[in-house]
Amino acid sequence: MCGQRDLDWITIRGLLANSLETAALTAEGFKDVGNGPGSRAAQYIEFLTIPDQKQAVIDDVERIRNHPLVPASIPVYGYVYDVKTGKLIEIEEATKIGAAR
């Protein structure tokens, strides 16, 4: 059975095989808008998609905060970078978890 991550890889690989143009995101999902040529080289890449960015940041900050080599006095912050606006978006729950103790 394929998980969501597997479906994302299949979608990305299929889009790149058809065209190297940036795909359009529609209500039905990604749509190839290019005319080719594409490349099958993507079949050798393991795309590590992140289905829930906020939770991924929270998990990462918690892992860093609790790591034995990170002193409790050092704060750890959690942000997501918005590629469209160029802004950092603070994930408040992650920053609370990463607060210095």
Image: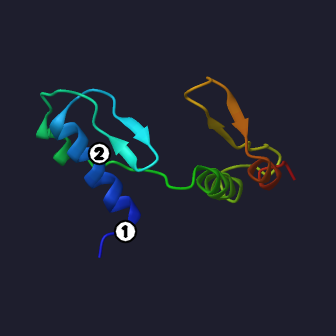
Asked if the residue under mark 2 is in contact with the one under mark 1, i.e. CB atoms within 8 Å, the reply is no
The amino acid on which the numbered mark 1 sits, given as a three-letter code, is Gly
The amino acid on which the numbered mark 2 sits, given as a three-letter code, is Ile
Looking at this view, name the residue that lies furthest to the top: 86
Number of marks: 2
* Residue marked by disc 2: 12
Other residues around mark 1 within 10 Å, as few (<14) / some (14–19) / many (≥20): few
Residue 50: image x %, image y %? 48, 52
Which residue is located at x 24 percent, y 41 percent? 15
Left or right: residue 8 versus residue 84 is: left
Checking the image for residue 66, the label placed there is none
Residue 88: image x %, image y %? 68, 31
Other residues around mark 2 within 10 Å, as few (<14) / some (14–19) / many (≥20): some
Question: In which quadrant of the rendered view does residue 22 lie?
Answer: top left
Residue 68: image x %, image y %? 66, 58
Mark 1 or 2, nearer chain start: 1
Identify the element where label 1 is drawn.
loop
Identify the element where label 2 is drawn.
helix
Quadrant that contains the N terminus: bottom left
Checking the image for residue 3, the label placed there is 1
Left or right: residue 25 versus residue 41 is: right
Looking at this view, name the residue that lies furthest to the right: 101
Looking at this view, name the residue that lies furthest to the front: 27
The residue lying toward the viewer, choosing from 26 and 21, is 26
Question: In which quadrant of the rendered view does residue 74 lie?
Answer: top right
Which residue is located at x 31 percent, y 70 percent? 2
In this rendering, is residue 90 above or below 62?
Answer: above
Which residue is located at x 50 percent, y 55 percent? 51
